[in-house]
Amino acid sequence: MLSRRVKWMTDDPTGYANTVTNANELLAIRQFIEAKVRVDQDIIKYILAFRVIRDDERVAAGPSPRGLLSLLRIARAIAVIDGRDYVIPDDVKSVAPDVLGHRIVLKPEYAIEGEVTGRDIVLEYLGKIPVPK
C-alpha cells in the first residue's frame, strides 16, 4: 500500500503546471475590480435579499454575510469578463447558484431525503426575489 501512495505522489501533475500569475498580481486584479466596477445600490439590495434563504424551513444555515460578499465580488468579476465597468442583475443571477448553493446547510430531514440541494434552493429564490430594473 505504501508503494502505491508514493507512486501517486510522484505522478502529481501540478509540477508541470505553468504559473500564470502570482499573489501580488492577483491582489492587484482584485483591487482593480473593486475600485473600477460600479455596483448600483439596487444590485446590492438584490444581493442582500438572498438573506431570506436563512429563514427557509428547509435550511439549518443559509448564506452568511461573507457568502453574500463573495457573490458581490464574483458578480463584479463577471462584469469585467463581459467588458463592463458595472454589474447587472444577470451577473448576480449567473453565479448565485454556484456561489451560494454550497453554503447552505439543509436541516437533517431534508438532507436525508436528498430531494433538494442548496443549489436547488438558490435557484428557487432566484425566481422569487424581485430583480432590480
Image (cartoon, rainbow, N blue to C red):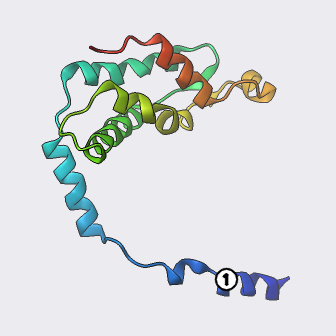
The picture places residue 7, in percent across and down from the top left corner, at 74, 87
**Residue at the image position 36 percent from the left and 28 percent from the top:** 90
Q: Quadrant of the N terminus?
A: bottom right
Kind of element beneath mark 1: helix
The picture places residue 5, in percent across and down from the top left corner, at 76, 81
Which residue extends farthest right? 1
Is 84 located above or below residue 49 in the figure?
Answer: below
The picture places residue 67, in percent across and down from the top left corner, at 42, 36
Is 74 located above or below residue 5 in the figure?
Answer: above
The image quarter in which residue 56 lies: top right
Residue closer to the observer: 83 or 95: 83
User: In the drawing, does residue 98 fall left or right of residue 26?
Assistant: right
For badge 1, the amino acid type reads: Met
The image quarter in which residue 88 lies: top left
The picture places residue 6, in percent across and down from the top left corner, at 73, 87
Residue closer to the observer: 62 or 12: 12
**Residue at the image position 29 percent from the left and 15 percent from the top:** 132
**Residue at the image position 25 percent from the left and 32 percent from the top:** 87
The image quarter in which residue 107 lies: top right
Residue holding disc 1: 9
Residue closer to the observer: 70 or 89: 89
